[in-house]
Image (cartoon, rainbow, N blue to C red):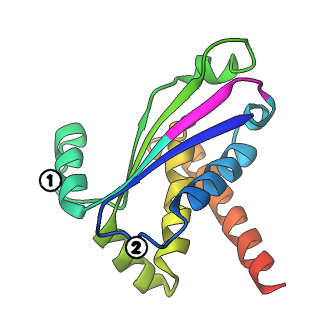
Amino acid sequence: MMLEVAVEADEEWDSSSPWKLLARRAAQAAIAESDYPELADVERTVELSVTLTSDEHVRALNSQWRRKDNPTNVLSFPMVDELDLKKADVAGPELLLGDIILAHGVCEAEAAEKGVSVEQHATHLMVHGTLHLLGYDHGDPAQEREMFGVQARLLASWRAAVTS
């Protein structure tokens, strides 16, 4: 798979952080652990976009698209459906997974609460967002359990890699 990750960061986000590298790592890991690991082997380009922005921007999007007038840590806007994902190995143009949007203030506060860096928490949220782009939904208890299980496995393996 050729994974193309576009990252755009507002001035609130630390410009010295390797956001594109972290987003790529999060997306690759989420895909590998998802219901669609075969995406890693497709010859098509797989694309997604990550926007690191302000709480106010996320609040506006959350209000417009989810009718919730508050910021949230991450929003995901999928551009593919299950059929697109199941047929990803068929020759064709790039596969546009969708957009992930993170709110700076919410991410920063949650990172402080968890005792991790903003980069670590943002990477976790990018995994979460990628899983949403791949069809995982909080509304389905089985999918939610699987989603949080994938996240927990990835975070544990990353922590183990850092400590070894």
Residue 136, given in percent of the width and then of the height, sits at 54, 41
Judging by the rendered image, the residue that carries numbered circle 2 is: 14
Name the disc covering residue 38, or none. Answer: none
Q: Residue at x 63, y 60 (%)?
A: 151
Q: Residues within 10 Å of mark 2 (few under 14, many from 20)?
A: few
- Which residue, given by chain and number where applicable, does mark 1 sit on? 69
Instruction: Report the residue at 52% width, 38% height from top.
Output: 48
For mark 1, give the secondary structure.
loop
Magenta stretch, residue numbers? 42-48
Front: mark 2 or 1: 2
Q: Residue at x 48, y 66 (%)?
A: 122
Residue 8 location, x and y as percent? Answer: 39, 52
Relative image position of residue 108 (x, y in whole percent): 37, 76
Query: Up-down: is 59 above or below 137?
Result: below
Q: Relative to 134, is 57 on the left or the right?
A: left
Q: Amino acid at mark 1?
A: Asp
Query: Can you say whether 40 is above or below 13 in the image?
Result: above
